[in-house]
Image (cartoon, rainbow, N blue to C red):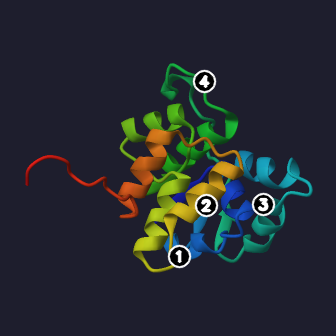
Amino acid sequence: MTVVSNSSPLVYLAALSDFELLPKLFGTILTPLAVWREVVEQAPGLPVRAAVEGALGHWMNVVPLTASPSLTTLPRGVLHAGEAEVIQLAREVGANAVLIDDRIAVEHARSLGFTVVPTVALYIRAKHLGLIPSVREKADQLRRARFRLSDADYQAVLRAAGELQRPPRSGPP
């Protein structure tokens, strides 16, 4: 499976000490140069820098684009450089999935036919594979780390992970 990652999944997995889930879930991860710059050159002192540097050449590779992201392929909203390069690289290498969280980028990637795996979905997959015991704990940690996860999305994540307690039914059986 060919997977291209944006910076946010890398940043949050490193912050929660879960970076090593990536090769267990997907094997090799590709990132474009803009993402590498965000997580290595522009992230001194953050856990993601050391995590990415340790993974490079093993199960993570930085792949240069053969063409610049075309403005004609971008959605109405503006994508950041990393998101635009993730989608462009995914197109160039024929990726099966992209790891990305930004809503506009998610919608655009889906419109191009890519499977989108947001950070929280990584944890759902990890739980289903027996790599972690609880998604709720990870979702709570993500929220404490300032990951944007609305109450509705939080509930949906727990439901998808089978960790949402359903309220008892009221009324006659």
Q: Secondary structure at mark 1?
A: loop
Could you tell me the amino acid type at mark 1? Ile
Q: Which mark is residue 132?
A: 1
Horizontal relation, residue 143 to residue 133: left or right: right
Secondary structure of the residue carrying numbered label 3:
helix
Depth-wise, is mark 3 or mark 4 nearer the camera?
3
Q: Where on the picture, by quarter, is residue 31?
A: bottom right
Q: Residue furthest bottom?
A: 130
Q: Are marks 2 and 4 in contact (CB under 8 Å)?
A: no
Q: Position of residue 138 (x, y in %)?
A: 59, 62
Q: Secondary structure at mark 2?
A: strand
Q: Earlier in the sequence, mark 4 or mark 1?
A: 4
Mark 4 surroundings: few (<14), some (14-19) or many (≥20) residues within 10 A: few
Q: Nearer the viewer, residue 14 or 72?
A: 14
Distance from Cα at disc 3 to Cα at disc 2:
15 Å
First reached walking from the N terminus: tag 2 or tag 4: 2
Residue at point 67%, 41% (across, down): 82
Q: Residue at x 42, y 77 (%)?
A: 129
Indicate the quadrant containing the C terminus: top left, top right, bottom left or bottom right: bottom left
Residue hosting label 3: 48
Q: Mark 2 highlights which residue? A: 30
Mark 1 vs 3: CB contact within 8 A: no
Choose top left, top right, bottom left or bottom right for residue 77.
top right
Disc 2 or disc 4, which is closer to the eye? 4
Relative to 45, is 128 on the left or the right? left
Residue located beneath label 4 in the image: 78
Q: Can the viewer see residue 94?
A: no
Residue 124 % position (x, y): 45, 63
Sequence order check, earlier mark of 2 and 1: 2
Residue located 61% across and 61% down the image: 30
Q: Of marks 1 and 3, which one's residue comes earlier in the chain? A: 3
